Amino acid sequence: ASTPIKPLTAPGKPPSSVATLLSLILTTDSFPLQTSWSLVNTNTRRGLRSLSSVVAERPLGFYVTPNTTYSEYLNLFAGIYEFVIYDTACNGLCCNYGYGSYTLKVNEILLGAGGGFGCYQSTTIHISNESGKTPSQKPSKKPLKKPSKKPSKQTSKEPSQTPRKKPSQKA
């Protein structure tokens, strides 16, 4: 059974931005007091960690129930973040003392997962467009209904691999 906990919110939300949903599903091992994590905005203060750059964290002692699944959700905005999960015994969440694990997703796209990571495991999260949404990893399936009216002005630097029936004309 999953245990939802108090939702986290990122400070400094720009008024016109659309948020991207980060989800963390974490199952503790037999020693949950050894588990903690942090999410840091690496754009803040040129990548130097400061109190203002910590977006969210769960400190040591937050997780107290062994072998329990917790669901965490957080709205993020455009930027570069680093998620780090720690285990103070340096044996990860799996498999010496229970079968803990975690999955980290942005808009349902898997970015990080695991359990057997030693002392810590780090995942960098890029949210790069202005809408705050992460681009999909698959191209769209449907082509445009109408072709564009004007050809692009950009020319290729390499010759084509297959000859054309008519030579191209210079403008």
Image (cartoon, helix red, strand yellow):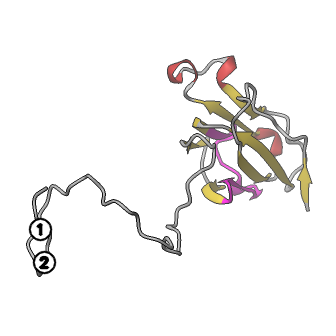
Give the magenta-colored segment's residue range: 83-108
In the orientation shown, which residue stands out farthest toward the bottom?
165
Considering the image in quadrants, where does the N terminus appear? bottom right
Q: Amino acid at mark 1?
A: Ser
Q: Secondary structure at mark 1?
A: loop
User: How crowded is the residue under tag 2: few (<14 C-alpha within 10 Å), some, or many (20+)?
Assistant: few
Considering the image in quadrants, where does the C terminus appear? bottom left
Q: Position of residue 105 (x, y in %)?
A: 67, 54
138 versus 166 height, above or below: above
How far separated are the C-alphas under marks 2 and 1? Answer: 8 Å
59 sits left or right of 6 in the view:
left
Report if the CB atoms under discs 2 and 1 are less than 8 Å apart: yes
- Name the residue nearer the viewer: 161 or 109: 161
Q: Residue at x 68, y 19 (%)?
A: 52
Q: Position of residue 122 (x, y in %)?
A: 57, 42
Q: Which callout, 2 or 1, points to the residue nearer the camera?
A: 1
Q: Is residue 91 magenta?
A: yes
Q: Position of residue 42 (x, y in %)?
A: 56, 29
Q: Amino acid at mark 2?
A: Arg
Q: Residue at x 42, y 69 (%)?
A: 147
Q: Residue at x 40, y 64 (%)?
A: 148
User: How crowded is the residue under tag 1: few (<14 C-alpha within 10 Å), some, or many (20+)?
Assistant: few
Q: Which mark is residue 22?
A: none
Please give the residue where the numbered disc 2 appears in the rendered image: 164
Q: Is residue 93 magenta?
A: yes
Q: Secondary structure at mark 2?
A: loop
Please give the residue where the numbered disc 1 appears in the rendered image: 168
Q: Position of residue 57 (x, y in %)?
A: 75, 33
- Name the residue nearer the viewer: 114 or 18: 18
- Name the residue nearer the viewer: 104 or 156: 156
